[in-house]
Image (cartoon, rainbow, N blue to C red):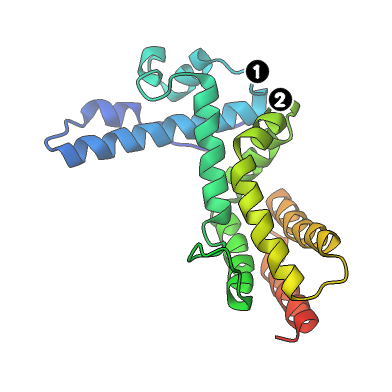
């Protein structure tokens, strides 16, 4: 697969940080570069088949330098997963009060699709990574606490809406979102994601009479 991420090694070698802020920014950029390259290799070749050495070669940096940022390949995967979970749910229950209002529910749908639209290739790689058996198990363990909190909040929301079967309603809702996202990242140039987003929102506004 063609490398879709820019390699910054020569740029970093030319940068000489003069302040603490510049040093932190360079480290941040380097860390993001490593995670981007690792995600691509994990998705293309499999997590177990990708070594730290391969990531270093693809990123045009030394293996030792990667260990300055990540203690292990598992920690690298952990940060990639945490980034995606954070990006996926950063607009869910914005005030973190555990109570989802109608406006917050529709806002979450809007922002979910906007997030995917902003970088469909990145999401496609992560979806490919998340389908690997070993990674699936890792995802379940590493995101369990966050998933429980989100699930409880959305469960309470549908309960207040007096859905006939709240558990089935949650499954239906998540399938609508995930199914639309999967179709979009499969063919982002032609899939009418905004049309589907509006249909989902209109469906629930009609269902809840809001």
Up-down: is 78 above or below 88?
Answer: above
Q: Which residue corresponds to the image point at 56% horizontal and 32% vertical from the top-left?
A: 39
Q: Which residue corresponds to the image point at 57% horizontal and 62% vertical from the top-left?
A: 92
Asked whether the viewer can see residue 36, the reply is yes
Q: Which residue corresponds to the image point at 75% horizontal and 75% vertical from the top-left?
A: 199
* Image quarter of the C terminus: bottom right
Horizontal relation, residue 134 to residue 37: left or right: right
Quarter of the image for residue 24 reads top left
| Residue sitting nearer the eye, 121 or 175 | 175
Q: Where residue 30 sits in the image (x, y, percent)?
A: 35, 32
Asked whether the beta carbons under mark 1 and mark 2 sit within 8 Å of each other, the answer is yes
What secondary structure is found at the residue carrying circle 1?
A: loop
The residue where tag 2 is placed is 134
Up-down: is 163 above or below 169?
Answer: below
Up-down: is 142 above or below 163?
Answer: above
Q: Where residue 1 sits in the image (x, y, percent)?
A: 63, 30
What secondary structure is found at the residue carrying circle 2?
A: helix
Mark earlier in primary sequence (1, 2): 1
Q: Residue 48 carries which label?
A: 1
Residue density around tag 1, few if under 14, some if 14–19, many if 20 or more, within 10 Å: few
Q: Which residue corresponds to the image point at 52% horizontal and 20% vertical from the top-left?
A: 73
Residue density around tag 2, few if under 14, some if 14–19, many if 20 or more, within 10 Å: few
Quarter of the image for residue 154 reads bottom right
* Outermost residue toward the left in this view: 18
């Amino acid at each position: 697969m063609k490398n879709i991420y820019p390699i910054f090694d020569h740029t970093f070698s030319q940068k000489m940080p003069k302040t603490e802020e510049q040093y932190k920014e360079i480290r941040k950029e380097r860390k993001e570069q490593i995670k981007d390259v690792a995600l691509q290799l994990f998705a293309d070749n499999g997590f177990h088949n990708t070594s730290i050495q391969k990531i270093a070669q693809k990123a045009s940096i030394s293996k030792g330098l990667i260990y300055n940022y990540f203690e292990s390949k598992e920690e690298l995967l952990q940060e990639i997963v945490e980034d995606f979970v954070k990006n996926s749910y950063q607009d869910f229950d914005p005030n973190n009060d555990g109570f989802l209002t109608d406006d917050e529910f529709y806002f979450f749908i809007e922002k979910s699709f906007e997030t995917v639209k902003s970088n469909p290739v990145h999401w496609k790689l992560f979806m490919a990574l998340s389908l690997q058996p070993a990674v699936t198990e890792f995802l379940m363990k590493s995101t369990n606490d966050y998933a429980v909190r989100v699930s409880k909040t959305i469960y309470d929301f549908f309960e207040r809406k007096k859905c006939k079967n709240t558990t089935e309603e949650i499954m239906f809702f998540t399938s609508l979102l995930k199914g639309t996202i999967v179709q979009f990242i499969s063919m982002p140039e032609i899939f009418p994601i905004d049309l589907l987003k509006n249909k989902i929102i209109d469906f629930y506004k009609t269902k809840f009479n809001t």
